[in-house]
Image (tube, grey):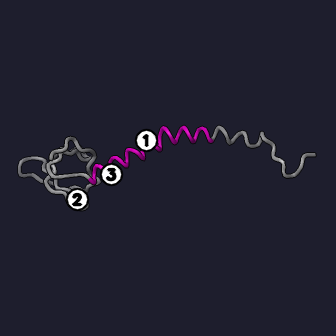
Amino acid sequence: MPAEGAVNPLVQLPIIPYALIFLVFWFLVIKPQKDKQRRHEAALKNLKKNDEVVTTSGVHGTLVLVKETTVMVRVDDNVKVEFDKEAIAKVVSVKS
């Protein structure tokens, strides 16, 4: 009879495939999404007047005013719309 403290190595074997699946999932899904989120947050912090942006709803425009939590976007002559900063999907071009 085996000692009570001894563990059969075959009992731990099913853990290995799950660990490998988790590692693959981490490197293919979780890590790239976190990196993308960090880049988006950095882009939102660096928004400046006259940057051309696209919102999450697909509105293209030029930043006229950047506030702490919102931005004013010019979408046409004399048409300005205020959006939350989080609504900016991407910066198309950066103007100085």
Q: Is residue 75 left or right of residue 38?
A: left
Where is residue 89? Give x, y as percent.
28, 46
Residue highlighted by disc 2: 70
Residue depicted at 57% across the width and 42% down the height: 22
Q: Is residue 55 left or right of residue 26?
A: left
Residue highlighted by disc 1: 32
Picture quadrant where residue 65 is located: bottom left
Q: CA distance from mark 2 to mark 1?
A: 27 Å
Where is residue 32? Give x, y as percent.
43, 41
Q: Nearer the viewer, residue 49 or 78?
A: 49
Q: Residue furthest right?
A: 1
The mark nearer the N terminus, 2 or 1, is: 1
Residue highlighted by disc 3: 41
Magenta stretch? Answer: 19-45
Where is residue 91? Give x, y as percent.
23, 44
What's the amino acid at mark 2?
A: Thr
The mark nearer the N terminus, 3 or 1, is: 1
Residue depicted at 53% across the width and 40% down the height: 25
Q: Nearer the viewer, residue 55 or 22?
A: 22
